Amino acid sequence: MFSHTRKSFLFRIMAAAVLVFAASSASAAETIRLTAVSGYSPVASWVHMFKEYFIPEVDRRLAEAGGDYEIDWTEGFSGTVVKPRGELEAIETGIGDIGIVVTAFHVDKVPLYNVAFVTPFVSHDLLLVVRTIDELTEQFPAMRESWDTYNQVYLAATGTVDTYQVVTSKPVRALSDFEGMKIGGAGPNLLWLEGIGATGVNSTLAEWYNGIKNGIYEGAIAWAEAAGNFKLYEVAPHYLNANLGAVNSFAVTVNKDVWDSLPDEVKTVLQEVATDYRDESARFVMAGAEKGMQAYRDNAGDIFELPEDERAKWAAALPNIAGDWADQMESQGLPGRAILGAYMQKMRDQSQPIARQWDQ
């Protein structure tokens, strides 16, 4: 009996020691606090994917790497920390540690990331576009260096536009129907309205519903997934399938001071997950495009395919926006012509449906 009791006692001591060791090992993990910011809510695909993919995937990979580090996330979305357009400044000043900057709103600050916006009618493959932007970032140091001015480290491009379309409050069947219309857009893509008689109104996705409803403008250059999710069919039931092209419109960045303070293991995981987030977000958007169009069909929306001759006429009617952009970049000492040529060549190499050779 004594032997059995002694064995039982020793077993309990050993078990307790194991638990104490496990607890001490778990407590050894260093906790890093990061605030992720976007002015948009998780209804927007890029925020949805950051919340549902990026954050948990970083947590998972850090745990798999040995559990030396864990992140205590603050999710500063839906305008709780910053409003739309304010992400770049928030990350620059340290209000946010990491987040999704809408590069389309900051063409004056990171202009080289605007190359896809000045080359419409080139590609409908969002995954190809965002991967190409990151390839160009590695090829041309000036692209990555442009973030240094704003105290940020660039991790990856992403996008939510599989191909831009136009949603309007009245039917558009030909380019001539745009005459006199006001159309909302995200800054750079308003250039696409030049030459067809419409007037662009600089605005954000979050503003389009009320802007169209209140008659500030009569439509928006949108994309299927967002048009469905934001219920634009209620105010702009006419969906013009114009296939204007895919663009990169976001960048995942980290405050540089924060980045410099992070352990190498955490930096590696953040960079790797950002690259995968880029691809997963593109796939998510492309899969959601059909759902967005179906939302139009289900809600009595009118979907019209712009005839190919009208699409070609639209591409030809535009001024040389890519050439003007490249010249402007060169005047600032930036390699605009080389980046434009490299981008277009990558698109040609992938046999994209190019309606206008912007570098020629």
Image (cartoon, helix red, strand yellow):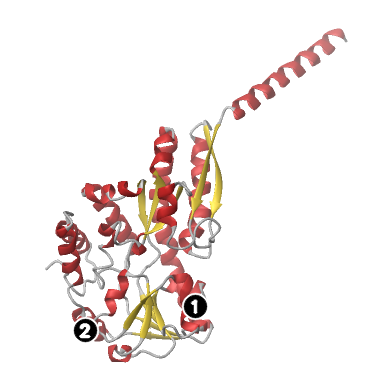
* Residue 310 visible, this orientation: yes
Mark 2 or 1: the one toward you: 1
Disc count in the image? 2
Left-right relation of 211 to 110:
right
Locate the N terminus by quadrant. Answer: top right
Nearest the eye: 321 or 27: 321
Q: Where 192 falls versus 262 (above or below)? A: below
Across and down, in percent, residue 23 comes to 65, 27
Nearest the eye: 157 or 354: 157
Across and down, in percent, residue 168 comes to 41, 85
Q: Residue furthest left?
A: 360
Residue type (three-letter) at the residue carrying disc 1: Tyr
Locate the C terminus by quadrant. Answer: bottom left
What is the number of the mark on residue 313? 2
Say which residue appears at 41% left-offset and 83% top-offset. 217
Q: Residue furthest top?
A: 2
Q: Are marks 2 and 1 in contact (CB under 8 Å)?
A: no
For label 1, count other residues whose C-alpha is less than 10 Å away and answer few (under 14), some (14-19) or many (20+).
many
Residue type (three-letter) at the residue carrying disc 2: Lys
Quarter of image, res 218: bottom left
For label 2, count other residues whose C-alpha is less than 10 Å away and answer few (under 14), some (14-19) or many (20+).
some
Left-right relation of 329 to 31:
left
Name the residue that disc number 1 marks.
209
Q: Residue furthest front?
A: 93
